[in-house]
Image (cartoon, rainbow, N blue to C red):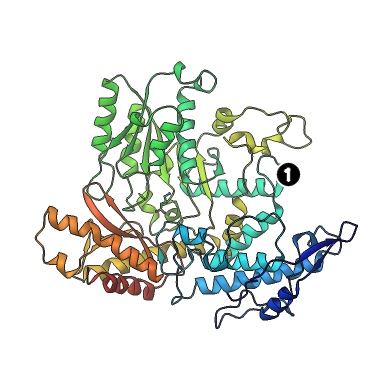
Amino acid sequence: MEGRPSVEIGVRQSTGGNVMEFTPTAEQQIDRSKQNPGSLGNTDEGLKYDIGREAHDFSCIYSKDLLPAEDGKEATKHFFQELLNILLAYISKSVKHSSKILDFHHPHQFKDGLEGFNLELPDQPDNLEQLLVDCRDTLKYGVKTGHPRYFNQLSTGLDVIGLAGEWLTSTANTNMFTYEIAPVFILMEEVILKKMHKIIGWTEKDGDGIFCPGGTTSNLYSVLLARFYYFPAVKTHGMSAIPRLALFTSAHSHYSIKKSAAVLGIGSDNVIVVKCDERGKMVPSELNSSIDAAKSKGLVPFYVNATAGTTVYGSFDPLNEIADICEQHGLWMHVDAAWGGGLLLSNKHRVKMQAIERADSVTWNPHKMMCVPLQCSAILVKRKGLLQECNQLCAEYLFQPDKQYDVSYDTGDKSIQCGRHVDVFKLWLMWKAKGSEGFEAQVNHCLENAEYLYYKLKRRTDFEFVFTGKPEHSNVCFWYLPQRVQNMPLGPERDRELHMVAPKIKEKMMEEGSTMIGYQPLGDKVNFFRCVFSNPATQRQDVDFLVEEIARLGCEL
Ligand code: ABU
């Protein structure tokens, strides 16, 4: 295999001191001469980058030779330059419309040591050449989620500034629990959270929050906070000290609400699922009657989750009406805007979240619609101080009250974690690079792509929409109908056949690696495709390609 050392590493001999010398075997020297050191990432025609001026041979160099080793600076530089070559080649290929999105292999193929790509861990150290080959292979066999024809997930794209932010974050390698060890990042988090509060429409005096690992965790925080707000005794006395609670969420909402109830000991059965209309929006009158019904059964309602941008349909619940109901019953209103939050940055689209400022808490994932590298999710809370009160346990080895600075900046006790990754810097850097206007343009572009797809499919007889009307978000949900299915009368038999179409097309597109789009059943709807746009690199030509590719792969089914 190109660039892959195919023989065992040479004998490592002790020189008596700390430094180990490497003596390559004769076989290795021959093998190495076949290699092309300095070009491990340049395997694709037209993708030549040479960050380093000269090619380097890494086959005798080991991690111990890099910094912090004395005189390790040059070797470290050359290693990084070569790694950068690999990353640049990958990024260039990722954004090239015609390149493959993936080179699919089954788990057993990887485990069998696919083309020499060995996932097992050695007892003896591998040399840096092997490590660079491993880095290249890791990317080679992965999925190019930044590809303009990757429509599979809500988090897509590859923002170079965001990536630079992630690199810097790892270089700093610090922890968000105290100002003491993350002063700049803590202040950046404060700046970003304030900006998000303002965009939501909360007043200056309102607003708190924290970045956490993904929307599910953010939603978990919202349930945790609501429960603590109404029943503070739960923190110390547990569930036996409080009544049997009920919370409400729509049939189209994210499963994390049920998961939160399960994790927090409330019980997933005590999550009341509220009916939606045919567009996947919560029906307010159903919410009201569900609350009354729960009360009459002796349950104590305390929390409603409204979704702004459902996972599959991209629907927006009617926030104003839900806020009225929450106010009337004295319930916590959470808005899960993990997916929809980005639309708040668009003057054209933020109207879909009118009344979001009435929420007690909001989940917003910049790693979705704002294309920030995974992961970047915020739980935003209207009441200042509640996060701290709910979660603080005052560990003395971290949160000493007698430090020389304002210890309110030791934000770690707001969190349910101890160690917390720095998720904020890449977002801060991207915001600096684009400005709010840049994000707005990005969001608008994604929704324009969705509208383009919608009108394109509307003109075709071999596609059918799952729900009528223009999409509200960038989700477009549809079935592809092979001629055979088009000819069938509506009914269970046709549904059975149609149910198998999307998985078969998906299998073929993954085998070919040409594009990726998700499918799922939902309620009484059999398997359908969900196309989502969050990658600013996607152009109309990619939308055209997707449609033609689905028809090409599916027409004979
Ligand atoms: N947190 C929901 C993400 C699911 C998706 O990307 O489709």
Q: Is residue 414 above or below residue 342?
A: above
Which residue appears farthest toward the front when viewing the image?
26
Q: Nearer the viewer, residue 418 or 228?
A: 418
- Assess mark 1: CB under 8 A from ligand 1? no
Q: Position of residue 315 (x, y in %)?
A: 32, 51
Q: Position of residue 265 (x, y in %)?
A: 44, 27
Quarter of the image with the C terminus is: bottom left
Q: Is residue 459 visible?
A: yes
Mark 1: secondary structure: loop
Residue highlighted by disc 1? 181
Which residue appears farthest toward the bottom when viewing the image?
46
Q: Nearer the viewer, residue 25 or 175?
A: 25
Q: Is residue 267 above or below residue 443?
A: above
Q: Nearer the viewer, residue 412 or 318?
A: 412
Q: Residue at x 28, y 66 (%)?
A: 454
Q: Position of residue 375 (x, y in %)?
A: 54, 52
Direction from residue 279 to residue 439 in the image, left or right:
right
Which residue appears farthest toward the left when viewing the image?
489
Quarter of the image with the N terminus is: bottom right
Which residue appears farthest toward the right when viewing the image?
16
Q: Position of residue 507 (x, y in %)?
A: 34, 64
Q: Is residue 515 visible?
A: no
When asked about the image quadrant of residue 358, the answer is top left
- Kind of residue at badge 1: Ile
Q: Nearer the viewer, residue 54 or 186?
A: 54
